[in-house]
Amino acid sequence: MAVKKITKAALTEWVGELVSKERVFGVQSKGDKFDFGPLTSAQDLRLDYDVTLQPPKKYFLPPVETLLTFEVSAGYESQYSDKPFVLIGVHPYDMIAINQIDELFKQGYYDTHYMTRRSNATIITCDVVNASENVFASQMKTATVKDGFDILLTDIGDSYIAEAATEKGEALLSKAETADASKDDLDKREKIQKDNEKNLSKHQLKCEVAELPGLLENAYNHPVWEEKAATCFACGSCNQVCPTCYCFNVQDDVKWDMKTGQRCRAWDGCMLDGFAMVAGGHDFRKKRADRFRHRLYRKAKYVPEKIGGQIACVGCGRCVSACLPDIANPVNVYNRLFDDIKTK
Ligand code: SF4
Ligand code: SF4
C-alpha cells in the first residue's frame, strides 16, 4: 500500500480536518506527563511523547462497561459501542499489546463487545521519538511493529513518513496533502526503526526473550517470589497500567425495582487481594507471593502458550514507574532467575 511523505504543517492540517469531522483520541501532555484523551485541536497532539500514563487498551476494553441491560418480563438486550473513532499516536509496543489482546479475545469465546470496538477503530501508530525512562521494548522485540495498525507515522525530521497498511488507512491518508516518499526518505525511516530496535533498552534482559517460558519451567519454588512480595502493597497499579493485562470482573447490578438492571464488566487485577476468590469464600491465590508469581508467569508462560509464544510483556516500562516499592520490573525478576537457574 501507499508509503507517503507528509510535511509537519500538512499533518497538523490533516489532523485538524479529522478532529472537525470524526471522533478522535490522541496523545496530549498532562503537565510533564502524557496520556491519550479526546482530541479537539491538532495543536494538542504530541507525537514526540515518551510514554503515556495509561495504555490505549481503554478504548477497546473500557475500565467499566455495560454488556447488557435486562428486564425480568422482557429479557435482555446486548449493549454495543458502535461509534467509529480514530486513535492517533499509538507506539509500536502498545500496538503489539493490542494485537495480542485481539488474538486472545477471538479465541474460545469470541468477545463481540471488544471486537466491535476494535473494528470501529482506525489506528494511527507512530514510531518512538523519545525513549521513556523505563522502556525496554528493544529487549522484548517490540520496538517496531509490522501489523495491526491502519497507518504508521515515522518522524524523519522536517516531515513524517506515512504508511497506510489497510484500505481504511489508505482512505484516511488520501485526505492529506502528501507526496511520494523517496528512497532517501525510506532510508531515513529504516535507520530510525533500526536504532529503536537497539536503543529502547533502559533495562537489559540477560537472556533471549524466547528463553523466558523455559526459564519459568524451573522457577515455581524460587525464593524470589517471597522476597519481592514482602514489600508489595497489593495495590494492582502494575496491572492497571499494563497494556497486556486484560482481566475483568462481571457483575449484575439490579435496580431497586428488582425487575430491571444491567450486567457490567470492570477491570480486575491479579495482584489484588480477592482476585482469585471463588464461591464459598475459597481464595486459591491468597498469598501476595503467589499473586506476584502468577503475574510474572502469566506474562512469560501462560499467555505465550495461548498466542504462539509471544511474551505478554511488551517492555513499555509503565509498571516499573508505577510501583512504589520498585519490585514490579519484570526484567529484574527474570534476570534474577536467569542468574540462579540458567547460569548454574
Ligand atoms: S509488564 Fe510492565 S513493562 Fe511489561 S508490558 Fe506490562 S506494564 Fe509494560
Ligand atoms: S508489584 Fe508494585 S505495583 Fe504491583 S501490586 Fe505490588 S506494590 Fe503494587
Image (cartoon, rainbow, N blue to C red):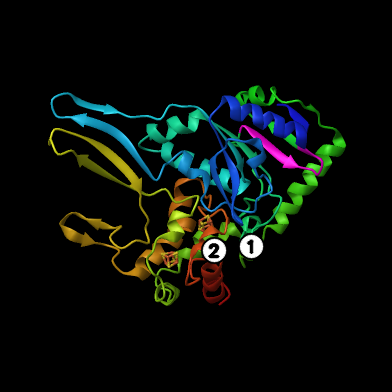
Q: Position of residue 340 (x, y in %)?
A: 53, 76
Q: Nearer the viewer, residue 289 or 170?
A: 170
Q: Write down the residue under mark 2.
A: 321
Q: Is residue 74 above or below residue 272?
A: above
Quadrant in which ligand 2 is drawn:
bottom left
Rendered residue at 40%/60% (across/down): 236
Q: Residue at x 29, y 58 (%)?
A: 276
Label 1 neighbourhood size at 10 Å, few (<14), some (14-19), many (20+)?
Answer: some
User: Which residue is at a point 50% across and 59% down the rendered structure image?
Assistant: 213
In contact (CB < 8 Å): disc 1 and disc 2 = yes
Q: CA distance from mark 1 to mark 2?
A: 8 Å
The image shows residue 272 at horizontal and vertical percentages of 34, 61
- Indicate yes or no whether the magenta region holds residue 106: no
Badge 1 marks a residue whose secondary structure is loop
Q: Mark number for residue 133?
A: 1
Q: Secondary structure at mark 2?
A: helix
- Residue shown at 59% from the left, 58% from the top: 209
Q: Quadrant of residue 1?
A: top right
Q: Callout 2, which amino acid?
A: Ser
> Which of the marked residues, 1 or 2, is nearer the chain's N terminus?
1
